[in-house]
Image: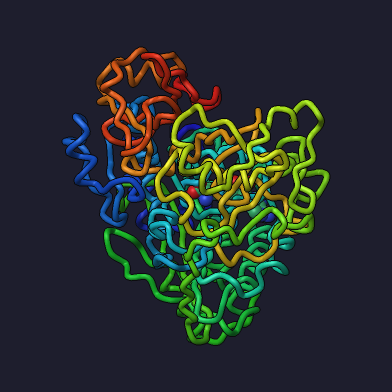
Amino acid sequence: MIGNLPRKFIEKMEKLLGTEFDNFMSSYDAPRVYGLRINRLKLNVQQWKELSSKSGEARPVPWAEDGLYYNEGERPGKHPHYHAGLYYIQEPSAMAPVELLDVQPGHRVLDLCAAPGGKSTQIAAKLQGSGVLVTNDNAKERTKALAKNIELAGVRNAVVLNEEPAALAPVFTEWFDRILVDAPCSGEGMFRKDETMIADWEKHSVERCSVMQRDILNHAAAMLSPGGLIVYSTCTFSPEENEQQIAAFLAQHEDFIVEAVPHRFGWAAGRADLAGENVQLDAKRQQSINGTLRLWPHRIEGEGHYAAVLKRAGKTLTITVNNKADNGEGKVSGADFPEAHLPIRSKTKAVNEGTNRLRGGILKRNGDNREKYSNDRRSSKQQAAGGRDSSFRSAPEDANPIELWRLSAEQFASGALNWPGKLIAYGSRVYIQPADMPPLDGLRVVRAGWYVGEAGRGRMEPSHPLAMGLTRGEAIRSVNWSSAETQTLRFLKGETIFVEESEIIVQEGATNKGYVLVCTDGYPIGWGKYAGGMIKNELPAGWRWM
Ligand SMILES: C[S@@+](CC[C@H](N)C(=O)[O-])C[C@H]1O[C@@H](n2cnc3c(N)ncnc32)[C@H](O)[C@@H]1O
């Protein structure tokens, strides 16, 4: 491996590390370590250890609440628990930045450079469903994986965006309590984990990255509320992208200070002496850069990282987001979401999901589709009460997706009409958006909230992300197989499963027939549809076990 490292890089590291250089170089011949983080939205480490036969060998990552090291051969990505979103596979050092962000339930949090979403799922677990996570990446392709990871983790209170920070800043001015800037960087700290990063090193030159980082950080500052925190992190060693970036930021933003990170667990201090001479900082502010953090692979079990905690002066406005439901009392209808709130830029494919658009609250459909709605004029309440089996097909002729959701939601999950958030329809899809979000007009929206269902064929189909965000106890119908049973794997591969009727657990008042939440070891892996002794597989193709 050492032989593949660029000469220029080696020379630079020798200068940077002095007497530690030899130890640093020998870390490239040491075996790399592997980490996963238990998804606290679903269960805790202890509960997972009780479920998992392999967990005995997992050791805690000292700096991450739910982080564990696992052995190389274990392949946790090939286990039903992965498909149930019980953990996220994450490099151990990459778990550190979110631990420094001090996220509390109720916070408004922005993950500005978020794809593929490792740190976003970590933030979501810390929010525990209360507050808001806005997770963004400017690379459109990468937001697909980001949205998928958010949905796999069962996150209910996130909005996924695909924007430049400059477009977000006017919409979210001083809006967030916490912002993570896990910046695009030259990746020097990842050479051991991923040798392809070495080839990219020349292309993603340090100079080019540091210009991007400065711009991203400045926009982040504009979106932070007084008293709030930004964590800036990179996976590179270069001072230009680390200490020098922080020095430039402090010089430009007098209302920010470095909040010193305790240097425990083998973590090393950032280096004020590397802050460069290009910016004018008073001695105290320059020295404060020693309170940032360097993770060196020869000092810890993890790859190379850098992190700084930046606190904005001012009184912390502890914002408790109003998580009161506003979707269950008939107050919210399509008409509350005029065109202006809908997607938006024609270049944005992801938000134009489906061909129908909600106009003034009414979904315009062609005659064919319209005929699929029955002319049932029962009240919403009557329909919902009678609607806990799959024979329920009726909706008013002019029902829009939001109305359809309200009529159907409690056929899938009890309490669904009282879930916090705002109902939003984008095309035929229905989302529950965290309360208090500013209008997202003009932004490229990948997920407007928790995607819960899609209107189609005259009825509401529950979405896969709805399944992943439920607990087994909420489901009107469920079936549960252990992760070792063949049915679990067969279901994950997309097969129809034959079952005894007695295997379907049904809430009081519901029939066996209809959507069933399929679970493994008690945790959802998708929807099936039960009728006549078999569960038809509703797992979308892109979510199946390959
Ligand atoms: C280090 S990666 C993020 C990893 C992610 N935080 C995680 O834990 O999974 C940096 C990300 O920044 C994104 N990026 C690059 N320039 C950006 C910009 N101007 N605004 C937002 N994101 C950007 C890249 O597409 C990339 O996905």
The image's colour scheme reads rainbow
Q: Position of residue 85 (x, y in %)?
A: 39, 38
Q: Residue at x 50, y 69 (%)?
A: 322
Q: How many marks?
A: 0
Q: Position of residue 469 (x, y in %)?
A: 43, 44
- The quarter in which the N terminus is drawn is top left
Q: Residue at x 46, y 80 (%)?
A: 287
**Vertical relation: 372 (above or below) 9:** above
In this orientation, does residue 8 appear?
no
Q: Residue at x 62, y 51 (%)?
A: 448
Residue 99 in which image quadrant = bottom left
Viewer-closest of 396 and 102: 396
Residue 269 in which image quadrant = bottom left
Viewer-closest of 69 and 279: 69
Relative to 439, 46 lies left or right: left
In this orientation, does residue 166 appear?
yes
Q: Position of residue 388 (x, y in %)?
A: 44, 36
**Vertical relation: 23 (above or below) 395:** below
Viewer-closest of 416 and 137: 416
Q: Position of residue 333 (x, y in %)?
A: 65, 55
